[in-house]
């Protein structure tokens, strides 16, 4: 370094249109403005660090937290005034003769190390100014004359953007440096002798819109949610999909998965969704490895928990949420979510039950009205990802040729291969289960969360439970529009055929069932659970 003193300016006017009062909006546990001030101060390179603002709350906050605050003239706080205008004014006012740096508070993720390295690069190069930039991987085109038929590519070859590194860099507002002499002479932060300083992509986020602020908040989430789940050929795949739905709702937190007795397909499924996971070997040690620096919640979706499990989790500093838990550990949890089982009068105050907590994948949100055809054309058979009772092949064989309606079977990724009659359409990979259900006139399925998905579509549904536990689910009643046939292995073939035949032949009954189903469910279940979990992370429950 040359030893030239550095004046560091953090401009924070109050008139942002994209995000009102942006600089004092919370990002993590402190205002957006604080992240930039702390990074510049931590770099240890600024001889003078000032906040420039026309906004009294910003100036008062800066002073209260020990920073020098410079009131900005009104003419330099308009939409037309540039950062160069502000920097030149301050350099003149302070009679600064060294270097001038501008560090935009809308770039909260620039690091102290990047500030130091940028200043070193600036002093080492024969330039008068520097600005940070990030190399873009997108395919950019240049519109030269407002005629998009003549736009020119700014890339050399077309490749997938995650692999491309094109000769286009985007200037960011995180670091701007200029000599005071050049700034005074040209009144611009960018001079003819200019250097771009490339920063890491994760430091380049610039907050201009509410969506940008949401993205930034997700990065600095204060809480960690560990989804502890069990899914395999015996218990099915529903627990995995349920946790993934909740993870999508809680995307603004740090998310981890702890897998208990899970088959390989679950590991693959979690990988496909981009989440980190580990296999449980020692609960206490595993939770210690997954815990974050702030508040921690563990979500148990493992069927019944033991008292030992929950006590170990609470001792490890986790708040505990249990899903559909009838075990002894439920009474020790902070909250038990129960969308499937009947309300027990003996349930404690920590239990929330009912359809309001049923979670739906986003493809089942805001579906069009269901049209109930007088002459059914399709029966959909789907018994989940594993179908341990082999109910799918059984129902397909029973219903084959019994009506004019086509039989379509969706076979789960871990369900055993079935012996399906010729002429029955069997599908292993479904683009949209919501579309499949909407196109069907009747659905045969098991007693899990698929019933709620069928309800969201309004398609009449007949249910065969895989086992005795599933048969106790509270949503298997006519009030909700569900026709429950019984526990699969105990229901005789003739009863299945008779009920399906009657349903297909009774347009009025199917219409009534459809309306009951649609009235029994909404798409806010995951949001309700997510809201309560955030409350636990904030210590509000």
Image (cartoon, rainbow, N blue to C red):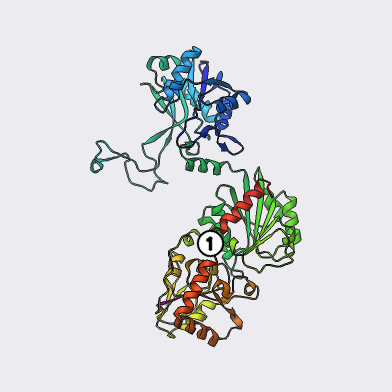
Quarter occupied by residue 33: top right
Q: Residues within 10 Å of mark 1 (few under 14, many from 20)?
A: some
Q: Is residue 349 left or right of residue 72?
A: right
Q: Position of residue 256 (x, y in %)?
A: 60, 52
Residue 538 against residue 507 in the figure, above or below: above
Residue 20 against residue 449 in the figure, above or below: above
Asked whether 515 or 455 is in front, the reply is 515
Residue at position x 55%, y 53% in the image: 249
The magenta span reads 376-380
Q: Is residue 299 left or right of residue 168?
A: right
**Magenta stretch encompasses residue 358:** no
Q: Position of residue 355 (x, y in %)?
A: 59, 64
Kindly state the secondary structure of the residue where label 1 is placed.
loop
Residue wearing tag 1: 522
Asked whether 273 or 281 is in front, the reply is 273
Q: Position of residue 356 (x, y in %)?
A: 59, 61
Whether residue 225 is visible to the viewer of this picture, yes or no, is: no
């Amino acid at each position: 370094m040359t030893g030239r003193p550095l004046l560091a300016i953090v401009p924070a006017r109050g008139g942002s249109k994209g995000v009102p009062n942006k600089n004092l909006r919370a990002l993590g546990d402190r205002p957006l403005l604080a992240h930039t001030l702390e990074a510049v101060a931590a770099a240890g390179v600024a001889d003078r660090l000032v906040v420039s603002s026309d906004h009294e709350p910003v100036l008062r906050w800066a002073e209260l937290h020990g920073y020098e605050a410079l009131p900005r003239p009104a003419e330099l706080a308009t939409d037309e005034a540039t950062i160069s205008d502000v920097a030149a004014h301050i350099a003149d006012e302070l009679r600064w003769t060294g270097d001038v740096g501008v560090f935009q508070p809308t770039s909260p993720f620039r690091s102290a190390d990047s500030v130091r390295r940028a200043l070193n690069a600036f002093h080492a190069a024969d330039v008068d100014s520097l600005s940070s930039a990030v190399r873009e991987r997108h395919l950019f085109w240049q519109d030269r004359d407002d005629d998009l038929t003549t736009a020119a590519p700014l890339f050399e070859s077309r490749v997938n953007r995650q692999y491309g590194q094109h000769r286009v860099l985007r200037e960011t507002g995180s670091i701007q440096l200029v000599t005071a002499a050049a700034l005074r002479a040209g009144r611009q932060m960018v001079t003819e002798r200019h250097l771009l300083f490339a920063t890491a992509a994760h430091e380049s986020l610039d907050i201009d819109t509410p969506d940008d602020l949401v993205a930034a908040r997700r990065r600095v989430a204060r809480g960690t949610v560990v989804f502890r789940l069990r899914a395999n050929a015996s218990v099915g795949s529903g627990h995995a999909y349920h946790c993934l739905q909740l993870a999508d709702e809680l995307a603004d937190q740090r998310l981890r998965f702890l897998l208990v007795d899970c088959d390989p397909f679950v590991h693959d499924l979690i990988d496909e969704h981009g989440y980190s996971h580990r296999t449980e070997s020692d609960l206490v040690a595993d939770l210690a490895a997954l815990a974050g620096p702030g508040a921690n919640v563990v979500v148990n979706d493992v069927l019944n928990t033991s008292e030992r499990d929950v006590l170990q989790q609470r001792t490890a500093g986790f708040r505990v949420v249990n899903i559909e838990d009838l075990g002894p550990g439920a009474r020790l949890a902070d909250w038990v979510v129960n969308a499937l089982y009947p309300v027990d009068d003996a349930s404690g105050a920590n239990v929330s039950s009912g359809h309001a907590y049923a979670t739906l994948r986003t493809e089942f949100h805001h579906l069009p009205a269901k049209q109930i055809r007088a002459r059914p054309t399709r029966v959909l058979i789907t018994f989940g990802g594993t179908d341990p009772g082999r109910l799918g092949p059984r129902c397909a064989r029973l219903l084959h040729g019994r009506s004019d309606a086509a039989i379509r079977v969706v076979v789960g990724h871990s369900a055993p291969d079935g012996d399906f009659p010729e002429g029955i359409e069997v599908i292993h990979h479904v683009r949209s289960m919501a579309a499949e259900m909407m196109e069907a006139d009747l659905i045969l399925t098991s007693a899990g969360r698929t019933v709620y998905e069928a309800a969201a579509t309004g398609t009449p549904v007949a249910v065969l439970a895989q086992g005795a536990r599933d048969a106790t689910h509270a949503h298997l009643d006519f009030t909700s529009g569900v026709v429950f046939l019984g526990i699969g292995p105990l229901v005789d073939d003739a009863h299945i055929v008779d009920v399906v035949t009657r349903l297909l032949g009774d347009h009025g009954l199917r219409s009534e069932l459809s309306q009951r189903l649609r009235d029994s469910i909404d798409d806010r279940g995951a949001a309700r659970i997510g809201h309560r979990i955030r409350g636990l992370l904030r210590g509000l429950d």
